[in-house]
Image: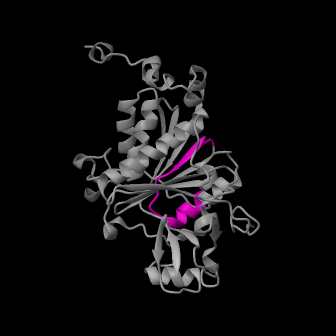
Amino acid sequence: MELKLNGSWRETPELATVGALLDHLGVTHQAVGVLQNGQVVAREAFDAQPLHGRDELEIVRFVGGG
Amino acid sequence: MSPEAAFPVVRDVDRVRRLVALPDVKPALLEKLARATVAMVGMGGLGCGSAPYLAAAGVGRLLLIDPGRVAASDVGRQVLYGPQDVGRLKVEVAAERLAQQSPELAISCEPVVLGAENAAALLAGATVVLDGLDDGRARDVLNAWAVRGEQAAPVIFGGALGYEGQVTVVPPGGRPCLACLFGSVADAPAECSVAGVLGPLVGLVGALQAAEALKWILGVGQTLSGRLWLMDLFSGASRVVPMPRRAACPVCGAGGG
């Protein structure tokens, strides 16, 4: 499926949910923010939130150091 | 030789001459700077990167909050500290350096850990709060404090780890707040002894936080409220991501207590 990830279009395997996408990308679910087509996906909903071809996603890790 | 003869007197009008040359900064706004208190929560890399610019610009008071002492491994990126300071309280050393830089600046030191039990008392009187923490749990406390809006003060959040940095502003009352996008950040990676950190990154993020603080105090420009500025010094890339309000946010939305 084709997804726009952090500003760039990418081809990925068929993935059912936002959580599956994060797992595919090797991104842990802790302190990660996801916008799907401009809307926030709450962390607790990652594994239930459906993913569709042509979705535009921003995946942001909170950087904790200071 | 008197101090006056040894050092040229830097008058307030000199200190702010380049600031008031900016198109949106009217001289009358400078009174806001002089009356402002900026609370620096954490005087590590981000605090060292931001505090000197706030002191230099003519902010009236800095409140330095950090229980830590200077470690040898801090000296490579926390540029207010040198080898002679190892073992001393960071807030005390920082206060000395900042007082040299800006003698008219009022500085208060609180060498304590900020937590839910003391945040309101510690931050009373703050005009703006700068996050210089490396602890996600304390960031959650700061976010909740901003959302409660007791002081009508924003929290300027910053983070830096490895080559990656980020900055955003949570306004009083939130909507959005940090938890709208991230939920709790208590488990965010923060340990630079594991991940490393490029020294100038903390200076860059700290300087951006200082810029946001000055803009907020002066009421000029567009703040980063509702936006997250991300930078990756490894690739030399930067982008700004929207941080929309989440209606069910557990801190500032319908999910809040």
Magenta stretch in the rendered image: B125-142
- Please identify the residue farthest to the left as the structure is shown: B83
Q: Is residue B250 above or below residue B224?
A: below
The colour scheme used here is one colour
How far across and how far down the image is residue B4, in percent?
A: 33, 14
* Quadrant, the N terminus of chain B: top left
Query: Going 70% across and 55% down the picture, which residue do you hit?
Result: B148
Q: Quadrant of residue B218?
A: top right
Task: In the rendered view, tell whether residue A62 sits above or below residue B167.
Answer: below
Viewport quadrant of the C terminus of chain B: bottom right
Could you say where residue A44 lies in the image, as x and y percent from the top left? Answer: 63, 79
Residue B131 part of the magenta-drawn span: yes
Q: At 60% from the left edge and 25% from the top edge, which residue is drawn?
A: B29
Residue B236 in sight: yes
Task: Kindly tell me whether residue A31 is visible in this rendering.
Answer: no
Q: Is residue B178 magenta?
A: no
Q: Nearer the viewer, residue B11 or A7?
A: A7
Question: Number of marks in the image?
Answer: 0
- Classify A60 as above or below B217: below
Image spot of residue B143 (x, y percent): 61, 58
Percent from the top left, x then y, of residue B5? Answer: 29, 12
Task: Classify residue A5 as left or right of residue B242.
Answer: left
Closer to us: B158 or B24: B24
